[in-house]
C-alpha cells in the first residue's frame, strides 16, 4: 500500500545533528524500499478552483505561511499501522508539528472481475 505523508513543518531548527539523523532515516527508508519519493514544497503555490466549467487560478492556497504544507513523502508500507510508525519516527526527528498520512489509491487498487 502507498501512503502520502505531508507536513506543516517541525519546531526543531535544522542543525547538523538533525540533518544527519534525518539523512540516516531517509537512507534507511530508501534502502528498504519504503521511500518512493520525498521533497519540499514552496509555501505559496497556486490555488485552482473549477466551478461551472470555469477554472480560477489564484496565488497560494494558504492564508498564512504557518498553514502551508512544506514537505511530503510518498511511502510504501504493508499496513496503515506501519505507515503511522514511519510517520512517528519522522516526527521524533522533526520535532513538534502537524501532518497527515493518507492512503494513495492507484490502478492496482481497482476491483477486478468477480468469480465466474
Image: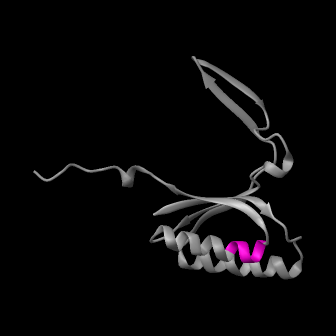
Which residue is found at the position 87% from the left and 72% from the top?
Answer: 14
Q: How is the image coloured?
A: one colour
- Name the image quarter holding residue 29: bottom right
Q: Is residue 45 above or below residue 97?
A: above
Which residue is found at the position 21% from the left and 48% from the top?
Answer: 113
Q: Is residue 63 above or below residue 29?
A: above
Residue 108 within the segment the image draws in magenta: no
Q: Is residue 63 visible?
A: yes
Q: Is residue 74 above or below residue 87?
A: above
Q: Residue 67 at what x, y percent from top left?
A: 79, 49
Which residue is found at the position 63% from the left and 70% from the top?
Answer: 87
Q: Residue 82 at what x, y percent from top left?
A: 52, 74
- Name the image quarter holding residue 9: bottom right
Which residue is found at the position 85% from the left and 82% from the top?
Answer: 17
Query: Residues in magenta?
Result: 90-94
Q: Is residue 26 visible?
A: no
Left or right, 46 with respect to 16, comes to left
Q: Nearer the viewer, residue 50 or 66?
A: 66
Left or right, 116 with respect to 96, comes to left
Type of secondary structure dominating the magenta stretch: helix
Amino acid at each position: 500500500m502507498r501512503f502520502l505523508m505531508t507536513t506543516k513543518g517541525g519546531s526543531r531548527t535544522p542543525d547538523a545533528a538533525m540533518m544527519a539523523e534525518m539523512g540516516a532515516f531517509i537512507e534507511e527508508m530508501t534502502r528498504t524500499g519504503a521511500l518512493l519519493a520525498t521533497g519540499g514544497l514552496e509555501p505559496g503555490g497556486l490555488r485552482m478552483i473549477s466551478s461551472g466549467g470555469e477554472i480560477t487560478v489564484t496565488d497560494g492556497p494558504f492564508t498564512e505561511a504557518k498553514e502551508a504544507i512544506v514537505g511530503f513523502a510518498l511511502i510504501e508500507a504493508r499496513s496503515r499501522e506501519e505507515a503511522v510508525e514511519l510517520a512517528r519516527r519522522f516526527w521524533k526527528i522533526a520535532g513538534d508539528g502537524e501532518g497527515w498520512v493518507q492512503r494513495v489509491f492507484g490502478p492496482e487498487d481497482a476491483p477486478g472481475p468477480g468469480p465466474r
